[in-house]
Image: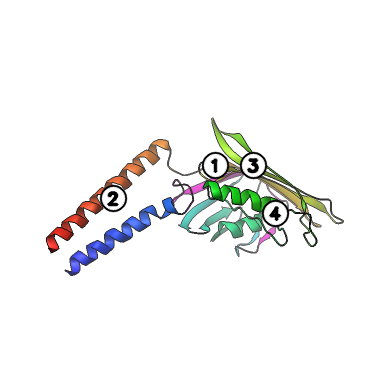
Amino acid sequence: MVTKNFSLLAIFFTIVLTFTPLVSGYSSNIIIGSTIEWRVEVAPNDAFNMYYSEGGLWVAENGSSMTFSIQSIGEDIVGRLTIGNISVIANDTDIAKDLTLGVWGTPTEWWPGLIVDVEENSIEDLNETAYASVERISGNYLNGTMTSRYENISVGNTLVECIVFDFEQDPTGFGEPQVTHLAYSLASGVLIEARTSYSFGVPYNLEISIMSLGLPTDDGYYYLSLIILLGLILAVVVLVYIFISRR
């Protein structure tokens, strides 16, 4: 009896863990163990603090790479970020804050992160929040102009359908206003390219572009789906067998 109950629990948790990425709202290609790699086209000349992810001061060279290896998937995606001299485990929202891939709006902040939820309603919410974060209202020092559009972006020999956001902060009395460009794949939710800059005394300029997703290819995803389906069928057969044998 103990063995049968253990088998039932093992099958249940296997199914839950297998299908968690599929029901999280993120693309089913976003799975634990995936590694995404970007090329750092332009990096800041000065060291900047990875305060929210607790990574410390980071410095990277132009032409180097930035990677994010996924370790868990939930409301945020947690993984190991490696850029320049630092490697830290953090969620992708905190990483976006540290790299200024979003808008410090008041009272509405907008931090899409490195990977966005690709469900239709989530894309609509993402779009609405982007515009809300830059509203010209009292107290919002990041007010400015936000635009969004759908665009096909070339990644190697492939055109990737993306949602693209462009933000330009209104002129400020000090330094240079923030200018940020973010493009996310509508298929995977992954950040395809980003350009962001500002100056509050010290200039900050970061440009990255996708190199490789480290995700299953179309054929790979087909076989992954087949394996999951066969596993589910096997689990059902075992459950039926256990049920019959207990009668």
Q: Earlier in the sequence, mark 4 or mark 1?
A: 4
- Do the residues under discs 3 and 4 have CB atoms within 8 angstroms? no
Q: Position of residue 16 (x, y in %)?
A: 36, 58
Mark 2 → mark 4, Cα distance in angstroms: 43 Å
Q: Taking 246 as reference, is 219 left or right? A: right
Where residue 132 is drawn, which disc sits there? Answer: 4
Q: Is residue 31 magenta?
A: yes
Residue visible at 25% across and 53% down? 235
Q: Taking 12 as reference, is 52 left or right? A: right
Mark 4 → mark 1, Cα distance in angstroms: 21 Å
Mark 3 → mark 2, Cα distance in angstroms: 37 Å
Determine if residue 60 is in view. Answer: no
Q: Residues within 10 Å of mark 3 (few under 14, many from 20)?
A: many
Q: Earlier in the sequence, mark 3 or mark 2?
A: 3
The quadrant in which residue 47 appears is: bottom right
Residue picked out by circle 3: 164
What element does badge 3 sit on?
strand
Q: Earlier in the sequence, mark 2 or mark 1?
A: 1
Query: Range of the magenta residues?
Result: 25-51
Towards the viewer: 111 or 176 = 111
Q: Residues within 10 Å of mark 4 (few under 14, many from 20)?
A: some
Residue picked out by circle 1: 186
